[in-house]
Image (tube, grey):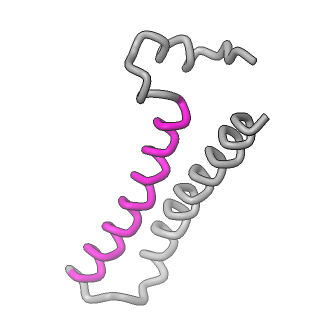
Amino acid sequence: MPDDNKISKTLSGVPGYVTVPNVLRFIGLALIIIAAGFYIGWSIIYNTWADIGLYSFVAPVFVFGILTLMYVQEKYHRSSEN
């Protein structure tokens, strides 16, 4: 089944490893790394390991990273099985 969306058309001229699933995986992993790095960095600098304000920023970023990876796994892994 061909994928006729704008992203696929844009990425059609680049090498094979730059695909929509790989770009989404990169974004998901980047969100997780940013959340973990921000939490650790902020906690070290300000010595606050239990700060609700910090959690309110880090938790959604981390969750969106996990959800992005789950989306890629569900959508693109299942379509390759069929």
Which residue lies most toward the right here? 82
**Residue 15 placement, left or right of 25:** left
The verdict on residue 26 being magenta is: yes
Which stretch is magenta?
20-44
Determine whether 51 is above or below 28 in the image: below
Q: How many marks?
A: 0
Looking at the picture, how far across and down is residue 11, in whole percent?
47, 17
**Residue 17 placement, left or right of 21:** left
Quadrant housing the C terminus: top right
**Residue 30 placement, left or right of 70:** left
The part of the image, by quadrant, that contains residue 38 is: bottom left
Looking at the picture, how far across and down is residue 75, in whole percent?
70, 40
Quadrant housing the N terminus: top right
Q: Looking at the image, which residue is at 36% across and 88% down?
A: 49
**Residue 54 placement, left or right of 45:** right
Q: Looking at the image, which residue is at 32% across and 88% down?
A: 48
Which residue lies most toward the left here? 45
Q: Main secondary structure of the magenta part?
A: helix
Name the one closer to the observer, 17 or 23.
Answer: 17
Looking at the picture, how far across and down is residue 23, in whole percent?
46, 36
Determine whether 47 is above or below 33 in the image: below
Determine whether 47 is above or below 66 in the image: below
Q: Looking at the image, which residue is at 36% across and 73% down?
A: 39
Which residue lies most toward the front here? 81
The verdict on residue 73 being magenta is: no
Looking at the picture, how far across and down is residue 9, in whole percent?
55, 11
Q: Looking at the image, which residue is at 29% across and 81% down?
A: 43
